Image (cartoon, coloured by chain):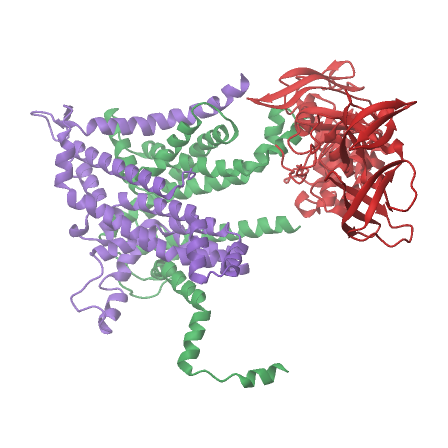
Chain colours: A red, B green, C purple
Amino acid sequence: MADSANSARGDLKLTRITKSYGDFTAVDDLSLTIPEGSFFALLGPSGCGKTTTLRMIAGLEEPTVGSIHLGSTDITTTKPYQRPINTVFQNYALFPHLTIFENIAFGLRRRGIKDVDEAVNKVLNLVELPHLAQRKPTQLSGGQQQRIALARAIVNRPALLLLDEPLGALDLKLRRQMQIELKWIQKEVGLTFVHVTHDQEEAMTMADTIAVMNEGKIEQMGSPADLYDNPKTAFVANFLGQSNLIKGSLVGTDGDSLVAELFGQKISLPRNRSHAVDSSIFAGIRPEKFRISLLQTPVSGNVLSGGKIEDVSYIGVSTQYQVMMPWGQELMVFEQNDDGVAPFQIGDAVNISWEPIFTFALRGDEDAEAGTEVIPEDLDEE
Amino acid sequence: MTVKQKDASIPTLPLGAQISRWIGRNLIRIYMVFAFTYLFIPVAYTFAFSFNDSGKSNLIWKGFTFDNWMNPCGAPEVCSALGNSIKIGLLATIFSTILGTMIAFAIGRYAFKGRSASNLLIFLPMATPEIVLGASLLSLFLVFQISPGFWPTVLAHVVFCVSFVVVTVKARIASLDPRLEQAAMDLYANEFQTFRRVTLPLVAPGIAAAALLAFSLSFDDFIITNFNSGTVTTFPKFVYVSAARGIPAQANVIGSAMFFLALALVIVGQVVSRKRKVS
Amino acid sequence: MKKISTPYLLLIPGFAFLFIFFILPIANLAQTSTQTPLLNGDTGQYEQTFRFANYIDAFIENREQFSRSFIYAIIATLIALLISYPLAYALAFKAGKYKNILLVLVVAPFFTSFLLRTVAWKQILGEEGFVVPSLRTIGVISESTTLTSTSFAVVMGMTYNFLPFMTLPLYASIDRIDPRTLEASGDLYANGFTTFRKVTLPLSMPGVVAGTLLTFIPAAGDYVNAQILGSPNTKMLGNVIESRYFKIVDYPTAAALSFTLMAAILILVTIYIRKAGTEELV
């Protein structure tokens, strides 16, 4: 069984992949390289094409156009069982008629390996469930099933491990725990993990590289910090965390900075964080980067004046404010509750300020709402 | 406030009202008792009269005896009729289960041209009255000068069993998560291995249920058998023919034995499947 | 290519079988139904003359049995529905941990032979049984009234014999109802009866449709109950077809009657399914 496709190793390379179902294009001219050994996340709302992409990598779907290479081997049309790629399925897909041991041994046996005991027991120890070997899947809790699904895949030492919303069915607490564990296991076994999720926090916690997908295309790819601090599109700015996007225009330069005018007030921003194509922009600032001050307090950095507190929500570690600006836009501000100062009151007249390096600029013709209205809780995407 | 005080404060209802309240509360239980009594009257009757020291005609209670149970083949033809029923039932079950399972996989697993027409072809035999199925098959056999008998009966039984097998197996296939098969393929099982190791074991309970259904349909069938069996006597046919002059008590023995056997099978099956779930 | 051919390969044996032993016989039956006796031939010898008047003759001659078949079948179906619905409802919602046992008990009587049960009813309701004498004693029926050899006995036998075909689909569809929807209905000011009419019944409709069809179809074509429990005055279409075949050897009339019965049932069923709006029966 150890043919060339099965023993292939190396970077995974998708080249100009398109997948259509009739008139509907699920994945649209997508190119992507996933380096060997990385923890890679495909992040996007349901229906963005991330699961379809994953299924094409697994061999469960064939691309309409384009090619998939693993190292130097073309695996575009090979069968799923001919690829050194394994999947942790959404809802796990453990075989209900087989014991946990036989579930894990399934892949090894199909590859003609006779002595499976050692490998199976080792991986059961890795996921810390050796005592469950003779149980049936239905007798396991969700978290246990999740680990067995993982064990069943990694026992085969695949070149690539695909995880399709693997934590979606777990409750919040267990999910956080499994995120850390998965990351640890990935380091331990040193495999390439490709993780599909709609949960931006999960992607940012675990992955070293994230590709944000929307409508069959990759919007932006990079490290979690890079995506958060320097989003290139309104979709990324809104889908990863929250952003205040303020309409404005570029009016000049000042050394390494650009100067922009927002409703008559001048601010500056780093040149390398501008993705504008002309002078029309949206200036973007994350809510936690803002500082609120009463009118008489002196402030530094970029300042927008004339705000009025509309709403205050005290949520423990921080207080969230809605500040109405003179041009009729409500800005969101998160203030840490670490200064012992009593929160502002509704109706207070305030200025808003922030450090210029925290500003990014998007194209002025973007939809400022893109990525805000996605419903994340739709697990059964297919 | 204690419960006792509360009780004392409630005025006792008049007896009539108490009775009607009790009936109101236990309406469903009362109904179930009536319904199950109705369901079991003929069974109880058949069982009771299997102990009748009746001689030839088992119409009137004449006295208690174990003789019928000790010698169930005592009445002429009872056991040969039973044997024919079992043989026909087993053969019809094997053929209809194989054919029906194949059809069920085709319809349940693939999208193809003519799928809805196939569904219709499966539905039609179920919507056709048995007498029409039986009569039409007999006409065909007569045209081809095949005389009615054992094999024509088997073929006739397969016709009406196939549809029930298809429907039963198809339901099982439909409840199968396609991701299980994808997971098998992902874990290096080729198409054949996936079918043998995952699909078939998971569909097997459905196939077994379909086979049991086919056997019981075939075993209990009278109308179609009556048209196509010629001189071959099956158990239902034997009962029908002897109904006019009184059925020998041995038939009651066989009927009761069948009842207890099937009941035991079902109960054992349920216990086993529950144990499997627990252990 | 592979994906296209596999299902057809799987279908070929079964459909070939159904073609030879179901479609062909029905076609042959249609053909037989328009034949007429061979001139100077023996009994049972017929020639193809496409005499469609056979149908009219057969219908007129047997219109009584024809209408009896449908009336009996409809009444038996309705009574079975009335008996089964509360039973299925109780099994689904009120049986608790006894659910599986009771479900087995519902089907268990049908493990004995269909014919044995029918004969048992004949003897229970007969003159030597205990029902008739006791009813006479308490004066419910008069001395001259009998229960066997009546249409009452035939309908009762059919109701009893086809009961599981009604109960099981009903149970399956009532059991699928989430009891919280019934609680929600009560929470939204519906009393017990309104909850049943507006929530339970509509949600169990697939079971009602499947159950009534599975009961009606065999009941309409049945002749065993009429034969064993009835009299010459309760003969149904099935009895006529049987005797035309075996006693009179009048194949064309038997075929015409069979065909009419099947067509009538199919038309009724189609109209019924359309009206009930459930087409996912198969």
* Residue A201: % across, % down: 78, 38
* Quadrant of res B66: bottom left
Q: Is residue C147 left or right of residue B203?
A: left
Measured from the top left, where is residue A336 in percent x and y? 86, 47
As rendered, which of C134 and C265 lies closer to the eye? Answer: C265
Q: Is residue B70 visible?
A: no
Q: Is residue B165 above or below residue C169?
A: above
For residue A240, which quarter of the picture? top right
C105 or A211: nearer the viewer:
A211
Residue sitting at x 77%, y 41%: A325
Q: Is residue B15 left or right of residue A99?
A: left
A203 vs B236, nearest the viewer:
A203
- Point out residue B145 in the picture as x, y percentages from the top left corner: 24, 25
- Quarter of the N terminus of chain B within the rendering: bottom right
Q: Residue furthest left?
A: C40
Q: How many marks?
A: 0
Decide which of A13, A319 is in the foreground and name it: A319
Q: Examine the image and state in which quarter residue A74 appears.
A: top right
Report the residue at 59% width, 29% height from top: B195
In the image: residue A21, left or right of residue A152:
left
Where in the figure is residue A317, as x and y percent of width and height? 84, 50
User: Height in image: B13 above or below C104?
Assistant: below
Q: Is residue C157 visible?
A: yes
**Residue in view at x 14 percent, y 24 percent:** C47
Q: Residue at x 54, y 18 (%)?
A: C2
